[in-house]
Image: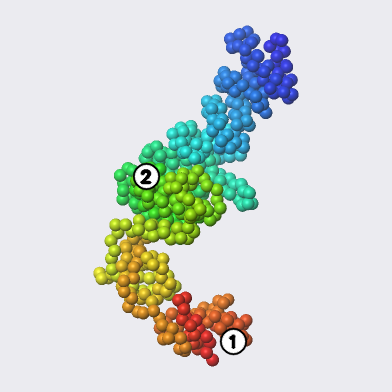
C-alpha cells in the first residue's frame, strides 16, 4: 500500500479498532521517515494522537517521538495532554501516580500549563499531573526533593483558588483545598525539610496573605513553619513570640493538636529536645486516650532518639491497652513499638490504669527543673473552678481546678490555704499557677453539723428545668431541687417563682457539689 492508501485505512480504522489504526501509523512512521519524499506529516501525527484515545496498548515511546517531532503544533500538544489525562490521570489513585510517573512527567516536556486563575472550568492535564505527583510523594515517606522539583515547574499564579467538596461514605460533605492552597501547603513543608528557611518563610507569608479560606489547619501550619524557620535562622525571640501567638489562637481541647503538630515539626527537623517538650504539653492538654494514640507513638519515637528507650515503655503499654480496648487492628507503626518493648497483649492492665501511670510521668516531665514557690489562695470564683494565689511579694497568679497535683472536689474549703506551685506560661502569655500542692488548710471542711437544719432568707438567682438556685448571704448558692418542693408545686414551680424574689429555705444537706435546700413556709 502506498502512503495515501495507508492514511485512508488508518482513518477508517480509527472508529473500529484504535489499536489497528495505531499499527498503521507506526508503519507510516517507519516506511516514510522525515526528509523522505512522502514523509510522515502533520496529518499522520494527528491520526496517531487520535488513535491513542481509548487505546490501552499504546507504544508510548513511539507517541512521544511523534509529539516531539511536531511539538510546535498546538493541537498535537493538546491531544497528547488528553491522552495522558484519559489513560493515566483520570480517577488515578496515589499508587497509580507513582506507578505511572515516568509517563506522566512527559507532560511537562510537551504540554503547557493553562491559566485557571480566572476560569477554572477547564481541565489542565499539566496541573493535574504536577499536583497529583506532588501529593503522591507527600504520602508515607515525604519526598521533599521530588516535591520541590515538581512544584517548581508550576506557575502558581495560574492555579485555581477555588476549593472543592465531595460527599463521603457517611453522607457528609468534605471540603477540599484548592490547587493554589495545596501548592503552598506542600511546597512550604518541602522547603522546611530541605532547610531553605528564608524561602519557606516567604512562601508561607504569601499563602497567609493570599488564601481566604484554609483547610486541614493549613493556616496554623504556615505559621508554625515560619516560627521554626525563624528559630533555625537564630531569631529565637521572634520564634518564641510566634509560637505563643499561635497557641493563643485556639482554646480548650483544640490546644493539644497544636502542641502535637509543633512536636511533629521539630521531630522532622531532628530537634528532639524541643519535640519532646511540645509532645509532653500535647499529652498534658489532651483528652481521651484513643484520640491520642498517634501522639503516644510520636512520644515513644522521640524518647528513643533521646536515648531514653526505657521511659518509652509506659507509652508502649498505653498504646497496646488502647488497641485492645478499641479492638483496632495493629498498624505497622504500632507493631514496631510493641515488638521493641515486648508487650504481652494478654497481660495488659486497663486503659484507665495505664493512663493514670502515664499522666504521672507527663507531670514529672512537664515540671522537671521548675522551681516551686509558696503562696496563699486568696480567691475562689463562684463557679468553683477558678481562683487566685497571692505570694508574699503581693504578686497574684490565676489557677484552674485541674492544676492541682491531687484532685480537689471542693475548692471553697481551700480559701486561705497555704500552697506551693510552679509558675507556667498560659496560652495568652500570662504567668499562671500549676502543679499546686496544698501545704496547710486554714479553714476546715464545711461540717454538716454546722449548717444542716439552719434556715435562711435568700433571693432567687436562677430558675432551671430541674429547680431553683437561691443566693444565700455569707454562703455559696444553694439548690432548691424541684423534687424537694411540695407535690403541688413540682410541675408549676417555674411559674410560681421569679428571679430576685425572697424565699425562706432550710439547708437539709451539705454535699461536695453544694448546698441542698428545702422550702420553708
Give SS at disc 1. Answer: loop
Q: Is residue 375 visible?
A: yes
Q: Which residue is nearer to you in this view: 496 or 327?
A: 327
How packed mark 1 is, by other alpha carbons closer than 10 Å (few <14, some 14-19, many 20 or more), is few
**Residue farthest left in this picture:** 393
In the picture, the quarter occupied by the N terminus is: top right
Give SS at disc 2. Answer: helix
Q: Is residue 447 above or below residue 156?
A: below
**Is 207 situated left or right of 231 in this image?**
right
How packed mark 2 is, by other alpha carbons closer than 10 Å (few <14, some 14-19, many 20 or more), is some
The location of residue 70, given as percent across then percent down, is 58, 19
The mark closer to the camera, 2 or 1, is: 2
Q: Is residue 48 above or below residue 245?
A: above
The location of residue 413, given as percent across then percent down, is 38, 76
Q: Is residue 72 above or below residue 308?
A: above
Q: Quadrant of residue 401?
A: bottom left
Q: Which residue is mark 1?
A: 486
Name the residue at 40% across, 76% down: 412
In the picture, the quarter occupied by the C terminus is: bottom right
Q: Which residue is mark 2?
A: 305
Amino acid at each position: 500500500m502506498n502512503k495515501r492508501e495507508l492514511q485512508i485505512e488508518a482513518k477508517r480504522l480509527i472508529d473500529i479498532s484504535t489499536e489497528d489504526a495505531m499499527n498503521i501509523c507506526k508503519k507510516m512512521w517507519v516506511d516514510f521517515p522525515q526528509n523522505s519524499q512522502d514523509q510522515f506529516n502533520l496529518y499522520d501525527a494527528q491520526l496517531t494522537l487520535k488513535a491513542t484515545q481509548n487505546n490501552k496498548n499504546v507504544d508510548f515511546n513511539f507517541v512521544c517521538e511523534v509529539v516531539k517531532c511536531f511539538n510546535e503544533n498546538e493541537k498535537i500538544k493538546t491531544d497528547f495532554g488528553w491522552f495522558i489525562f484519559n489513560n493515566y490521570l483520570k480517577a488515578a489513585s496515589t499508587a497509580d501516580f507513582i506507578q505511572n510517573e515516568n509517563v506522566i512527567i512527559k507532560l511537562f516536556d510537551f504540554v503547557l500549563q493553562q491559566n485557571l486563575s480566572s476560569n477554572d472550568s477547564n481541565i489542565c492535564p499539566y496541573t493535574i499531573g504536577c499536583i497529583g505527583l506532588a501529593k503522591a510523594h507527600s504520602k508515607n515517606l515525604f519526598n521533599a526533593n521530588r516535591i520541590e522539583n515538581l512544584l517548581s515547574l508550576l506557575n502558581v499564579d495560574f492555579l485555581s483558588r477555588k476549593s472543592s467538596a465531595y460527599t463521603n461514605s457517611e453522607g457528609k460533605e468534605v471540603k477540599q483545598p484548592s490547587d493554589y492552597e495545596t501548592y503552598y501547603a506542600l511546597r512550604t513543608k518541602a522547603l522546611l525539610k530541605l532547610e531553605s528557611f528564608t524561602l519557606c518563610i516567604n512562601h508561607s507569608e504569601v499563602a497567609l496573605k493570599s488564601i481566604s479560606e484554609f483547610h486541614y489547619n493549613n493556616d496554623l501550619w504556615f505559621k508554625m513553619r515560619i516560627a521554626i524557620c525563624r528559630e533555625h535562622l537564630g531569631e529565637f525571640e521572634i520564634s518564641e513570640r510566634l509560637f505563643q501567638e499561635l497557641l493563643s489562637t485556639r482554646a480548650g481541647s483544640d490546644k493539644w493538636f497544636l502542641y502535637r503538630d509543633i512536636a511533629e515539626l521539630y521531630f522532622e527537623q531532628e530537634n528532639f529536645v524541643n519535640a519532646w517538650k511540645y509532645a509532653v504539653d500535647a499529652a498534658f492538654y489532651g483528652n481521651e486516650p484513643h484520640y491520642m494514640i498517634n501522639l503516644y507513638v510520636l512520644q515513644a519515637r522521640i524518647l528513643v532518639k533521646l536515648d531514653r528507650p526505657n521511659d518509652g515503655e509506659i507509652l508502649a503499654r498505653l498504646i497496646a491497652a488502647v488497641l485492645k480496648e478499641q479492638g483496632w487492628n495493629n498498624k505497622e507503626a504500632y507493631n514496631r513499638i510493641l515488638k521493641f518493648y515486648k508487650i504481652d497483649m494478654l497481660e495488659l492492665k486497663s486503659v484507665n490504669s495505664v493512663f493514670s501511670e502515664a499522666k504521672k510521668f507527663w507531670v514529672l516531665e512537664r515540671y522537671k527543673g521548675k522551681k516551686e514557690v509558696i503562696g496563699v489562695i486568696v480567691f475562689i470564683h463562684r463557679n468553683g473552678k477558678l481562683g487566685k494565689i497571692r505570694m508574699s511579694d503581693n504578686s497574684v497568679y490565676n489557677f484552674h481546678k485541674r492544676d492541682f497535683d491531687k484532685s480537689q472536689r471542693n475548692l471553697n474549703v481551700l480559701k486561705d490555704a497555704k500552697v506551693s506551685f510552679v509558675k507556667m506560661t498560659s496560652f495568652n502569655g500570662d504567668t499562671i499557677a500549676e502543679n499546686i500542692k496544698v501545704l496547710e488548710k486554714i479553714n476546715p471542711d464545711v461540717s454538716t453539723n454546722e449548717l444542716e437544719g439552719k434556715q435562711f432568707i435568700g433571693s432567687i438567682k436562677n430558675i432551671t428545668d430541674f429547680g431553683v438556685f437561691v443566693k444565700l448571704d455569707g454562703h455559696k448558692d444553694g439548690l432548691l431541687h424541684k423534687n424537694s418542693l411540695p407535690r403541688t408545686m413540682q410541675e408549676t414551680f417555674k411559674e410560681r417563682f421569679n428571679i430576685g424574689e425572697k424565699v425562706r429555705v432550710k439547708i437539709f444537706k451539705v454535699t461536695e457539689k453544694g448546698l441542698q435546700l428545702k422550702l420553708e413556709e
